[in-house]
Image (cartoon, rainbow, N blue to C red):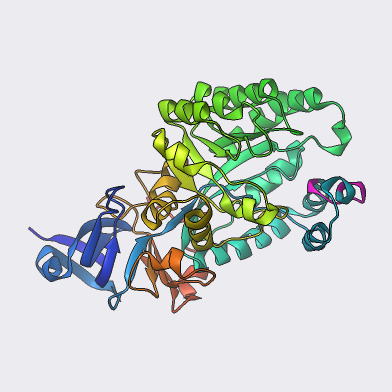
Amino acid sequence: MTVACDFLLRRAGELVTMADRATLGVVRDGALAARDGRVVWVGKEEDLDGAVDPVDGAVEVDAEGACVLPGFVDCHTHLVWAGDRADEYARRLAGASYLEIQATGGGIMSTVRATRAATTEELAALARCRLDSFLRHGTTTVEAKSGYGLTLADEAKQLRAAAVPHPVRRRRTLLAAHAVPEEFAGRADEFVDLVCGEIVPLLAAEAEFVDVFCDEGAFTVAQARRVLETGRAHGLGLKIHAEELARSGGARLAAELGAVSADHLVHATAADAAALAAAGTVAVLLPGTSYFLRSAYAPARELLAAGATVALASDLNPGSCHCENLQLVVSLACQELRLTPAEALWAATAGGAQALNMAGEVGSLVPGRRCDLVVLDAARHEEVAYHFGVNHVDGVVVDGVVVVEGGRLTAAAAADSWSPYGGRRETA
């Protein structure tokens, strides 16, 4: 029996399917076929012609012996914001403290002011530019957080701007409890009242997850619990910023509530790791942020030893990690978190998919999954971590459509056929 297909990938030197965490499911001299945007066959090149029946006009991609990976899944980004904080970066490197920068109008509130002043259309244009950069670097799925509006109207603006039509798939996260806005200074509980009483109930339909920054100088465990329980009551999955600046108790709260993920975890303990593993909560690690801030790194090996699922993400944001390149994050994870290249690549694909409740859709190249893949300008998957600081991506495919070729976006990437949430529009 042959299977019909409208997309063929031929001659992959290494086809890394991520079908198995230990071996990555590597098929040497591999090939792949897809139909209507989903993988229908994976195997050896020598078996391809006898296994598939291409329809007229089927797209064919010749990998020419290169390594092929699933599209990267970046499960923690702050995609939508306005303004620029490059000057703060230079001041911080020159010795200015965060409090000094904040006292002169900088810090997160400078981004909040700029985002509030921008229109939805302006924010959408900025988001599209960042999504283009993600795509050129091989990321085909991202999480997009709000959190720079901190009012009902401005959080709504961010979530709606994140839905700009584009090939990159998106899952939106309502992070209204990112910081206490200036107008609520000294009244954090009142702001949490607003978040739980108005913002979450009215915006839950425009997001898939709710998030809260539970850490020193942000929100307490009790306040975070209120936000997360409110989100769950309105049908949202749970995420939490935890243990980044100090041990806050956020990781244990995530485990207790069955959160999909707990993110950062720089100060997580062995007990936290065991709790996350037992709860099935994904540990999302962000080494780019530690690098940017010159801070400690999360205990990745301890989390893995405890049996926790580890994912890697960029934490793209204007203040602590302005980077869309998940390949660089993979290399940092190998160097600083002591992951192997195989562990890091799994964490940046299949692990990221688990952190977005999308394991059945993306992050691996097996029959039934979305045909989202990356053709590298490299023969081996280890090159991603080993040859760092460059973009290895030669081609990218989303839903069986070639959107990057020769390292450049194709005309198809800018077509109007893409869903506001990524991938091809569903047709009736």
Q: Does the image show residue 392?
A: yes
Q: Which residue is drawn at 50% across and 26% down?
A: 271
Nearer to me, 20 or 157: 20
Nearer to me, 83 or 271: 271
User: Looking at the image, which residue sits at the far left?
Assistant: 1
What percent of the width, then of the height, locates residue 97?
A: 84, 50
Q: In which quarter of the image is residue 318?
A: bottom right
What percent of the width, then of the height, locates residue 409?
A: 50, 74
Q: Which residue is drawn at 66% across and 26% down?
A: 224
- Residue range in magenta is 102-108
Q: Quadrant of residue 3?
A: bottom left
| Number of marks present in the image shown | 0
What percent of the width, then of the height, locates residue 64?
A: 29, 78
Q: Check if residue 337 falls in the magenta segment.
A: no
Q: Which residue is drawn at 57% across and 54% down?
A: 314
Nearer to me, 52 or 373: 373
Say above or below: 52 vs 259.
Answer: below
Q: Is 36 left or right of 307, judged from the image as shown?
A: left
Say above or below: 96 vs 310.
Answer: below
Q: Is 122 left or right of 230, judged from the image as shown?
A: right
What percent of the width, then of the height, locates residue 231?
A: 59, 27
Q: Is 316 left or right of 260, judged from the image as shown?
A: right
Q: Does the image show residue 357?
A: no
User: Looking at the image, which residue sits at the far right?
Assistant: 104
Nearer to me, 126 or 317: 317
Where the N terminus falls, by quadrant?
A: bottom left
